[in-house]
Image (cartoon, rainbow, N blue to C red):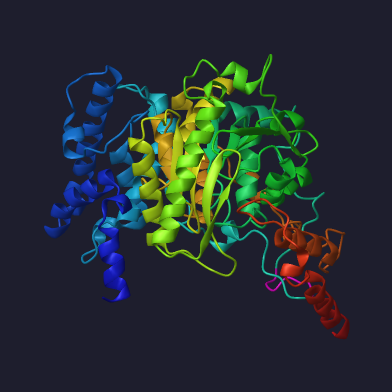
Amino acid sequence: MSFSSRRRNYLLTPHRRDGLIEWMKEMLMHSFVLDALDTTGADTFSHFEMLIEEHRALTQCDSPQPSRLKQLVPTAGLFHTRLPLRHAFVAYNKKYALASRKHVCISFNELRHILNLAQVMAFVFSERDSPDEEQLMREENALKRWESSPSALLLTPRENEAPPPLNLDGSIQEESPIINESEAPRTMVDDNSHEKKSNVAQYRGPKLITFDGDQTLYSDGANFESNPLLASYLYMLLRHGVTIAVVTAAGYEYQAEKYELRLSGLLEYFKQRQLPAKDCARFYLFGGECNFLLNLSSDYRLHPVRERGPGGWITSTKYIPETPGNWNESSVQSLLDLAEKTMKSSLEEQNLRARIIRKKRAVGMIPKPSEQISREALDETVLRAHAELDRHAGVDLPFCAFNGGRDAWVDVGNKRVGVQVLQSYLGVLPVETLHIGDQFLNTGNDYAARDVCPCVWITCPDETTYMLKSILRLAGVSLNDVENDISPNDAVHTGESKEKGSKGINFDELERRTSMVQRMDVFTGEIVNQKQSPPPRQTLAKAKGDLTKK
């Protein structure tokens, strides 16, 4: 069997499919075959929208009668807001001309994008059946702003590649004006400025945005180091009063420096832009899905949030049955024992070149050095863990078994609990929350968040950047503030020197970051013996020598 045939057959298995999107794709196929998508496509999305509204109404009143959507798509879950799918399709089609295609039908990913856009629109558009003229005008202007943005999911170099490419000597490859940080126009610096207040007043979007880590904010197994545009969008959201939380499976307990390493470029960006203390206080990180809560302080460092006592996050959310404050330690260890036993069995029976590690609230199967575990083997391990834990009578705690891309994990707790704790602790409603992640299949760890808030399904950090741009644009935020906030001097992410007029590379900073990445195992959080990898100084010394010769 060829690789393409094997991949195609593998993708037909239920754990690699989303029931709702597959059903929508099948329904749209009729219009495409009849070459009528241009005239009937919008009506089909109106039908989807009507079925979802009916499903929402029956779900909210706990009706025993299954909705028509539930009968058509048995896996359909909760919808926390209405989804203006017709508006989303019309805007998306106007921008990308889907209906003009003759040979390729709307794809899975395009439907995912339309659903994402509809979800973002739901935060801006009115829930009322008969919105007033002012509201209609606001919605129309929001759509025009979105439609006028560059017609590509990966943005144009002007918007998506904020600092320009550099030569080895640190010079800019393409001609670009050098703007000193002190001269760069920024309208959002002064908390007391009239423009700051008016921008905050006009922002209409989610009040709490939670993010997955790997493959959402940074590449899988990597760190957030060099993405100034994404950092600037997060910065602008914080400046507009939005609370941001990274809800990640990475569980280093309360060792804040290890989380800081994973987010080093983002935290340095906040520091460079002098993010005010009150905005820093709205940035959180939840490690181990829902086990270790940290908060950003005015020193741009992460600090553990008090667990117990007055104001403690565990104490104040104990009324929620599944939160960590109600877990029995013996039950936690029993769940981990069973998960470890299942993973060891899977490793041995599949002859995998991997090892099992155990943390305080998680068990993982990770590859041995210089080895890889196939996606099929990881999925098999995850599905075995699901089956074993689901049928075991002694497991009464929430858990999450998921394929991390290069590894497989079973965590005590999940992102449903993590997001719910944040909502309770911060006083934010589910309809005011948005979760952004990349794993919404049943072998992932983001789909549990669907139970407690609206979600957006992305596949890479570039899509996250685009979604944040869409949120800001539709929410009424001028993106000139974002673009002006980025200058070619934003070199902290690549280790360049920030001294005025300097075109050299800051080798000391680059060496520090490179050595830290080499010394930390992202799977375990352990500091690796430096002898296991060649020291970066040799490479950097060679680069310095080359520059000297030039």
Which quarter shows the N terminus? Answer: bottom left
The percent coordinates of residue 206 (x first, y second) are 50, 31
- Using the image as rendered, state which of residue 106 and residue 341 is in the foreground: 341
Q: Is residue 424 left or right of residue 125?
A: right
The quadrant in which residue 248 appears is: top right
- Using the image as rendered, state which of residue 500 and residue 466 is in the foreground: 466
The percent coordinates of residue 137 (x first, y second) are 41, 31
Residue at x 68% of width, y 31% of height = 196
The percent coordinates of residue 396 (x first, y second) are 42, 28
Residue at x 75% of width, y 73% of height = 534
- Compared with 80, 511 (above or below) is below
Over which residues does the magenta segment extend? Answer: 169-175
Which quarter shows the C terminus? Answer: bottom right
Residue at x 55% of width, y 57% of height = 220
Is residue 20 found inside the magenta-colored segment of the image? no
- The answer to whether residue 437 is seen in the rendering is no
- The answer to whether residue 181 is seen in the rendering is yes
Residue at x 35% of width, y 54% of height = 109
- Using the image as rendered, state which of residue 274 and residue 451 is in the foreground: 451
Q: Is residue 412 left or right of residue 239?
A: left
Q: Is residue 327 left or right of residue 274?
A: left
Dominant secondary structure, magenta? loop
